[in-house]
Image (cartoon, grey):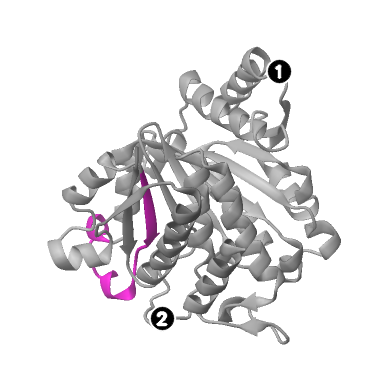
Amino acid sequence: MGKHIVVIPGDGIGREVTDAAVEILKKTDEIYHLDFTYEWKDAGGTAYDKYGVPLPEDTIEACRKGDAILFGAVGGDQWDHLEPALRPEKAILGLRKSLGLYVNLRPVKIADSMIEYSPLKPEIARGTDIMIVRELVGGIYFGKRCESVIAGGVEKAWDVECYSAAEVERITRFAMEAAGKRHGHVTSVDKSNVLASSRLWRRTVTSVRDKEYPHVHLDHMYVDNCAQQFAIHPSFFDVVVTSNMFGDILSDEAAVLSGSVGMLPSASIGEETSLYEPIHGSAPDIAGKGIANPIATILSAAMMLRYSFSEDRAADAIEKAVNDTLEDGYRTGDIYKDGMKKVNGEGMTEVILDHLDQ
Protein backbone atom coordinates (compact mmCIF):
# COMPACT_ATOMS: atom_id res chain seq x y z
CA MET A 1 0.00 0.00 0.00
CA GLY A 2 1.33 3.42 -0.95
CA LYS A 3 2.40 6.16 1.43
CA HIS A 4 1.08 9.72 1.23
CA ILE A 5 3.46 12.63 1.87
CA VAL A 6 2.19 16.14 2.60
CA VAL A 7 4.67 18.77 1.37
CA ILE A 8 4.55 22.22 3.00
CA PRO A 9 7.08 24.52 1.29
CA GLY A 10 6.32 27.53 3.51
CA ASP A 11 8.17 30.78 2.81
CA GLY A 12 11.43 32.03 1.33
CA ILE A 13 13.67 29.23 0.09
CA GLY A 14 11.19 26.63 1.36
CA ARG A 15 9.83 25.98 -2.13
CA GLU A 16 13.30 25.46 -3.64
CA VAL A 17 14.57 23.07 -1.00
CA THR A 18 11.40 20.99 -0.73
CA ASP A 19 11.25 20.70 -4.55
CA ALA A 20 14.80 19.34 -4.45
CA ALA A 21 13.94 16.83 -1.72
CA VAL A 22 10.85 15.64 -3.61
CA GLU A 23 13.02 15.05 -6.70
CA ILE A 24 15.30 12.86 -4.59
CA LEU A 25 12.33 11.01 -3.09
CA LYS A 26 10.88 10.34 -6.55
CA LYS A 27 14.17 8.92 -7.79
CA THR A 28 14.45 6.78 -4.64
CA ASP A 29 10.88 5.62 -5.22
CA GLU A 30 11.84 4.47 -8.74
CA ILE A 31 14.79 2.48 -7.40
CA TYR A 32 13.14 0.92 -4.33
CA HIS A 33 9.47 0.82 -5.47
CA LEU A 34 8.10 2.75 -2.49
CA ASP A 35 4.83 3.93 -4.10
CA PHE A 36 4.71 7.50 -2.72
CA THR A 37 2.00 10.06 -3.46
CA TYR A 38 2.28 13.78 -2.73
CA GLU A 39 0.06 16.68 -1.77
CA TRP A 40 1.12 20.33 -1.38
CA LYS A 41 -0.29 22.63 1.33
CA ASP A 42 0.33 26.18 2.56
CA ALA A 43 1.65 27.38 5.90
CA GLY A 44 3.52 30.39 7.25
CA GLY A 45 3.51 33.83 5.68
CA THR A 46 2.31 32.57 2.31
CA ALA A 47 -0.71 31.04 4.02
CA TYR A 48 -1.37 34.29 5.90
CA ASP A 49 -1.35 36.24 2.62
CA LYS A 50 -3.89 33.83 1.12
CA TYR A 51 -6.11 32.98 4.08
CA GLY A 52 -5.38 35.46 6.87
CA VAL A 53 -3.88 32.78 9.17
CA PRO A 54 -0.44 31.14 9.20
CA LEU A 55 -1.84 27.63 9.63
CA PRO A 56 -5.12 26.94 7.80
CA GLU A 57 -7.34 24.19 9.16
CA ASP A 58 -7.19 22.57 5.73
CA THR A 59 -3.42 22.14 6.14
CA ILE A 60 -3.81 20.60 9.59
CA GLU A 61 -6.41 18.12 8.33
CA ALA A 62 -4.23 17.10 5.38
CA CYS A 63 -1.32 16.52 7.74
CA ARG A 64 -3.44 14.39 10.06
CA LYS A 65 -4.38 12.17 7.13
CA GLY A 66 -0.87 12.01 5.69
CA ASP A 67 1.72 9.36 6.48
CA ALA A 68 4.49 11.97 6.81
CA ILE A 69 5.08 15.69 6.33
CA LEU A 70 7.97 17.37 4.53
CA PHE A 71 8.28 20.97 5.74
CA GLY A 72 10.41 23.76 4.26
CA ALA A 73 10.77 26.92 6.33
CA VAL A 74 8.63 29.87 7.43
CA GLY A 75 9.17 33.54 8.16
CA GLY A 76 10.21 36.78 6.51
CA ASP A 77 10.58 40.49 7.23
CA GLN A 78 7.32 41.35 5.49
CA TRP A 79 5.35 39.62 8.23
CA ASP A 80 7.23 41.03 11.24
CA HIS A 81 4.54 43.66 11.80
CA LEU A 82 1.89 41.02 12.54
CA GLU A 83 0.72 40.30 16.06
CA PRO A 84 2.44 37.20 17.54
CA ALA A 85 -0.53 34.87 17.00
CA LEU A 86 -0.48 35.57 13.24
CA ARG A 87 3.24 35.40 12.55
CA PRO A 88 4.51 32.67 10.22
CA GLU A 89 6.44 30.89 12.98
CA LYS A 90 3.15 29.98 14.64
CA ALA A 91 2.60 27.49 11.82
CA ILE A 92 5.28 25.05 12.93
CA LEU A 93 4.35 25.44 16.61
CA GLY A 94 0.71 24.85 15.73
CA LEU A 95 1.53 21.72 13.74
CA ARG A 96 3.58 20.27 16.58
CA LYS A 97 0.70 20.82 18.99
CA SER A 98 -2.12 19.73 16.66
CA LEU A 99 -0.33 16.56 15.57
CA GLY A 100 1.01 15.58 19.00
CA LEU A 101 4.64 15.58 17.87
CA TYR A 102 6.38 14.61 21.10
CA VAL A 103 9.95 13.86 19.97
CA ASN A 104 12.37 16.18 18.22
CA LEU A 105 15.34 14.47 16.56
CA ARG A 106 18.42 16.50 15.71
CA PRO A 107 21.30 14.52 14.21
CA VAL A 108 24.72 16.13 14.03
CA LYS A 109 27.28 14.20 12.01
CA ILE A 110 30.59 15.57 10.76
CA ALA A 111 31.78 13.73 7.66
CA ASP A 112 35.50 13.64 6.94
CA SER A 113 34.92 15.81 3.86
CA MET A 114 33.35 18.51 6.07
CA ILE A 115 35.76 18.56 9.02
CA GLU A 116 37.43 21.75 7.83
CA TYR A 117 34.12 23.60 8.25
CA SER A 118 33.82 22.77 11.94
CA PRO A 119 34.97 25.40 14.45
CA LEU A 120 36.59 22.55 16.38
CA LYS A 121 40.08 21.24 15.76
CA PRO A 122 40.00 18.31 13.29
CA GLU A 123 41.21 15.83 15.88
CA ILE A 124 38.28 16.82 18.15
CA ALA A 125 35.61 17.02 15.43
CA ARG A 126 36.49 13.72 13.74
CA GLY A 127 34.01 10.93 14.49
CA THR A 128 31.21 13.21 15.71
CA ASP A 129 27.87 11.45 15.17
CA ILE A 130 25.25 12.58 17.71
CA MET A 131 21.49 12.03 17.74
CA ILE A 132 19.76 14.43 20.12
CA VAL A 133 16.35 13.17 21.27
CA ARG A 134 14.46 16.13 22.74
CA GLU A 135 11.12 15.81 24.54
CA LEU A 136 8.93 18.28 22.67
CA VAL A 137 5.54 18.73 24.34
CA GLY A 138 6.25 18.91 28.08
CA GLY A 139 8.44 20.69 30.57
CA ILE A 140 8.80 24.38 31.26
CA TYR A 141 7.67 25.50 27.79
CA PHE A 142 4.24 24.00 28.42
CA GLY A 143 3.99 24.46 32.19
CA LYS A 144 1.99 26.97 34.18
CA ARG A 145 3.28 30.52 34.01
CA CYS A 146 2.70 34.02 35.23
CA GLU A 147 3.76 36.94 33.05
CA SER A 148 3.65 39.51 35.84
CA VAL A 149 2.40 39.78 39.40
CA ILE A 150 3.10 42.32 42.12
CA ALA A 151 3.99 40.67 45.42
CA GLY A 152 5.27 42.68 48.35
CA GLY A 153 5.65 45.69 46.08
CA VAL A 154 7.95 43.79 43.69
CA GLU A 155 7.07 42.58 40.20
CA LYS A 156 7.60 38.85 39.70
CA ALA A 157 7.11 36.33 36.91
CA TRP A 158 7.39 32.55 36.91
CA ASP A 159 7.38 29.43 34.76
CA VAL A 160 6.86 25.88 36.06
CA GLU A 161 8.89 22.88 34.92
CA CYS A 162 6.71 19.79 35.26
CA TYR A 163 7.14 16.27 33.92
CA SER A 164 5.17 13.12 34.60
CA ALA A 165 6.83 9.73 34.80
CA ALA A 166 4.75 8.65 31.79
CA GLU A 167 6.13 11.48 29.65
CA VAL A 168 9.70 10.59 30.59
CA GLU A 169 9.08 6.89 29.98
CA ARG A 170 7.80 7.57 26.47
CA ILE A 171 10.77 9.69 25.39
CA THR A 172 13.21 7.27 27.06
CA ARG A 173 11.82 4.31 25.11
CA PHE A 174 12.23 6.24 21.88
CA ALA A 175 15.85 7.07 22.74
CA MET A 176 16.62 3.47 23.70
CA GLU A 177 15.13 2.16 20.45
CA ALA A 178 17.14 4.72 18.47
CA ALA A 179 20.34 3.68 20.25
CA GLY A 180 19.60 0.04 19.40
CA LYS A 181 19.81 0.98 15.71
CA ARG A 182 23.01 2.97 16.21
CA HIS A 183 25.83 2.28 18.67
CA GLY A 184 23.86 1.21 21.76
CA HIS A 185 24.80 4.18 23.97
CA VAL A 186 22.38 6.67 25.58
CA THR A 187 23.41 9.74 27.57
CA SER A 188 20.55 11.20 29.60
CA VAL A 189 21.01 14.89 30.36
CA ASP A 190 19.42 16.61 33.35
CA LYS A 191 20.12 18.92 36.30
CA SER A 192 19.25 16.50 39.08
CA ASN A 193 21.63 18.09 41.56
CA VAL A 194 19.27 21.10 41.65
CA LEU A 195 15.86 20.34 40.10
CA ALA A 196 13.19 17.98 41.45
CA SER A 197 11.86 17.44 37.91
CA SER A 198 15.34 16.31 36.87
CA ARG A 199 15.51 13.85 39.76
CA LEU A 200 12.24 12.32 38.53
CA TRP A 201 13.72 12.33 35.02
CA ARG A 202 16.86 10.49 36.11
CA ARG A 203 14.99 7.89 38.21
CA THR A 204 12.57 7.18 35.39
CA VAL A 205 15.19 6.92 32.64
CA THR A 206 17.20 4.52 34.79
CA SER A 207 14.15 2.40 35.55
CA VAL A 208 13.10 2.07 31.90
CA ARG A 209 16.60 1.15 30.86
CA ASP A 210 17.07 -1.43 33.63
CA LYS A 211 13.69 -3.11 33.07
CA GLU A 212 13.35 -2.94 29.29
CA TYR A 213 16.72 -2.19 27.64
CA PRO A 214 19.49 -3.76 29.75
CA HIS A 215 21.63 -4.19 26.62
CA VAL A 216 21.84 -0.40 26.08
CA HIS A 217 24.69 1.41 27.82
CA LEU A 218 23.29 4.35 29.83
CA ASP A 219 25.10 7.22 31.47
CA HIS A 220 23.81 10.42 33.05
CA MET A 221 25.27 13.88 32.65
CA TYR A 222 24.43 17.30 34.06
CA VAL A 223 23.40 19.74 31.35
CA ASP A 224 26.27 22.17 32.02
CA ASN A 225 28.82 19.37 31.72
CA CYS A 226 27.14 18.12 28.55
CA ALA A 227 27.45 21.57 26.98
CA GLN A 228 31.17 21.49 27.73
CA GLN A 229 31.66 17.94 26.45
CA PHE A 230 29.98 18.79 23.13
CA ALA A 231 32.82 21.27 22.58
CA ILE A 232 35.76 19.19 23.82
CA HIS A 233 34.78 15.54 23.25
CA PRO A 234 31.76 15.32 20.90
CA SER A 235 32.68 11.86 19.61
CA PHE A 236 31.87 10.46 23.08
CA PHE A 237 28.15 10.78 22.39
CA ASP A 238 25.77 8.52 20.51
CA VAL A 239 22.15 9.23 21.51
CA VAL A 240 21.44 12.12 23.89
CA VAL A 241 17.99 12.24 25.51
CA THR A 242 16.85 15.28 27.42
CA SER A 243 14.00 17.61 28.34
CA ASN A 244 12.37 20.24 26.18
CA MET A 245 14.34 23.28 27.32
CA PHE A 246 17.70 21.53 27.70
CA GLY A 247 17.21 19.90 24.29
CA ASP A 248 16.38 23.24 22.71
CA ILE A 249 19.64 24.74 23.93
CA LEU A 250 21.91 21.73 23.41
CA SER A 251 20.67 20.99 19.89
CA ASP A 252 21.46 24.55 18.80
CA GLU A 253 24.92 24.28 20.34
CA ALA A 254 25.52 20.95 18.62
CA ALA A 255 24.40 22.38 15.27
CA VAL A 256 27.37 24.75 15.33
CA LEU A 257 29.78 21.81 15.46
CA SER A 258 29.17 20.94 11.81
CA GLY A 259 30.02 24.43 10.58
CA SER A 260 26.90 24.88 8.42
CA VAL A 261 23.24 24.83 9.45
CA GLY A 262 22.43 24.42 5.76
CA MET A 263 23.49 20.80 6.11
CA LEU A 264 21.45 19.68 9.11
CA PRO A 265 18.07 17.88 9.06
CA SER A 266 15.55 17.34 11.84
CA ALA A 267 12.42 15.36 12.60
CA SER A 268 9.46 15.85 14.93
CA ILE A 269 7.92 12.48 15.67
CA GLY A 270 4.34 11.71 16.71
CA GLU A 271 2.34 8.57 17.31
CA GLU A 272 0.15 9.09 14.21
CA THR A 273 2.37 11.06 11.82
CA SER A 274 5.73 12.85 11.81
CA LEU A 275 7.20 16.03 10.35
CA TYR A 276 10.62 16.44 8.73
CA GLU A 277 12.35 19.78 8.13
CA PRO A 278 15.77 21.43 7.76
CA ILE A 279 16.93 23.37 10.80
CA HIS A 280 17.76 26.48 8.75
CA GLY A 281 15.36 29.36 8.28
CA SER A 282 13.56 30.71 5.24
CA ALA A 283 16.51 32.92 4.11
CA PRO A 284 14.32 35.46 2.25
CA ASP A 285 17.41 37.34 1.08
CA ILE A 286 18.36 34.49 -1.29
CA ALA A 287 14.88 33.16 -2.08
CA GLY A 288 14.24 32.70 -5.79
CA LYS A 289 17.92 33.00 -6.73
CA GLY A 290 18.44 29.24 -7.02
CA ILE A 291 21.47 29.26 -4.71
CA ALA A 292 19.95 27.73 -1.57
CA ASN A 293 21.66 24.59 -0.26
CA PRO A 294 19.10 21.74 -0.44
CA ILE A 295 21.14 19.17 1.51
CA ALA A 296 19.47 19.68 4.91
CA THR A 297 16.03 19.11 3.38
CA ILE A 298 17.25 16.13 1.35
CA LEU A 299 18.67 14.58 4.52
CA SER A 300 15.36 15.34 6.27
CA ALA A 301 13.68 13.27 3.54
CA ALA A 302 16.13 10.46 4.30
CA MET A 303 15.08 10.67 7.96
CA MET A 304 11.47 10.37 6.81
CA LEU A 305 12.27 7.13 5.01
CA ARG A 306 14.00 5.77 8.10
CA TYR A 307 11.64 6.83 10.89
CA SER A 308 8.20 6.98 9.24
CA PHE A 309 8.50 4.22 6.65
CA SER A 310 11.25 1.94 8.03
CA GLU A 311 12.95 2.08 4.63
CA ASP A 312 16.50 1.96 5.96
CA ARG A 313 18.07 0.85 2.66
CA ALA A 314 16.55 3.80 0.81
CA ALA A 315 17.55 6.21 3.59
CA ASP A 316 21.10 4.85 3.54
CA ALA A 317 21.23 5.33 -0.23
CA ILE A 318 20.27 9.03 0.02
CA GLU A 319 22.75 9.67 2.83
CA LYS A 320 25.50 7.92 0.86
CA ALA A 321 24.67 9.90 -2.28
CA VAL A 322 24.94 13.16 -0.31
CA ASN A 323 28.22 12.09 1.28
CA ASP A 324 29.68 10.96 -2.07
CA THR A 325 28.69 14.30 -3.62
CA LEU A 326 30.53 16.17 -0.88
CA GLU A 327 33.51 13.82 -1.12
CA ASP A 328 33.69 14.68 -4.83
CA GLY A 329 34.07 18.34 -3.90
CA TYR A 330 30.69 19.77 -4.92
CA ARG A 331 29.62 22.79 -2.87
CA THR A 332 26.86 25.38 -2.91
CA GLY A 333 27.86 28.97 -2.24
CA ASP A 334 27.29 28.83 1.52
CA ILE A 335 30.00 26.18 1.95
CA TYR A 336 32.19 26.89 -1.09
CA LYS A 337 35.95 27.20 -0.70
CA ASP A 338 38.70 27.66 -3.28
CA GLY A 339 39.44 24.47 -5.16
CA MET A 340 35.92 23.07 -4.79
CA LYS A 341 33.31 22.62 -7.53
CA LYS A 342 30.74 25.38 -7.10
CA VAL A 343 27.13 24.57 -8.02
CA ASN A 344 23.75 26.16 -7.36
CA GLY A 345 20.91 24.40 -5.57
CA GLU A 346 19.64 22.71 -8.71
CA GLY A 347 23.14 21.60 -9.62
CA MET A 348 23.68 20.09 -6.19
CA THR A 349 20.42 18.17 -6.53
CA GLU A 350 21.40 16.86 -9.97
CA VAL A 351 24.74 15.56 -8.70
CA ILE A 352 23.07 13.80 -5.77
CA LEU A 353 20.57 12.25 -8.20
CA ASP A 354 23.46 11.01 -10.31
CA HIS A 355 25.05 9.38 -7.28
CA LEU A 356 21.74 7.71 -6.40
CA ASP A 357 21.80 6.07 -9.82
CA GLN A 358 25.26 4.58 -9.28
Q: Residue furthest top?
A: 211
Q: Residues within 10 Å of mark 2 (few under 14, many from 20)?
A: few
Where residue 127 appears, as percent x and y from the top left, is 78, 53
Q: Nearer the viewer, residue 80 or 327?
A: 327
Q: Position of residue 270 (x, y in %)?
A: 40, 36
Query: Is 204 situated left or right of 162 in this image?
Result: right
Q: Position of residue 261 (x, y in %)?
A: 57, 65
CB atoms of marks 1 and 2 within 8 Å? no
Residue 149 in the magenta stretch? The answer is no
Q: Could you tell me which residue is drawn at 40 percent across and 69 percent down?
A: 282
In this figure, which residue is indicated by the disc labeled 2?
285
* Range covered by the magenta-colored residues: 68-87
Label 2 SS: loop
Q: Which comes sooner in the sequence, label 1 or label 2?
A: 1
Considering only vertical position in the picture, is 215 above or below 144? above
- Which labelled disc corresponds to residue 214? 1
Q: Secondary structure at mark 1?
A: loop
Q: Residue sitting at 41 percent across and 84 percent down?
A: 289
Identify the residue at horizontal 80%, vertical 53% (top origin).
232
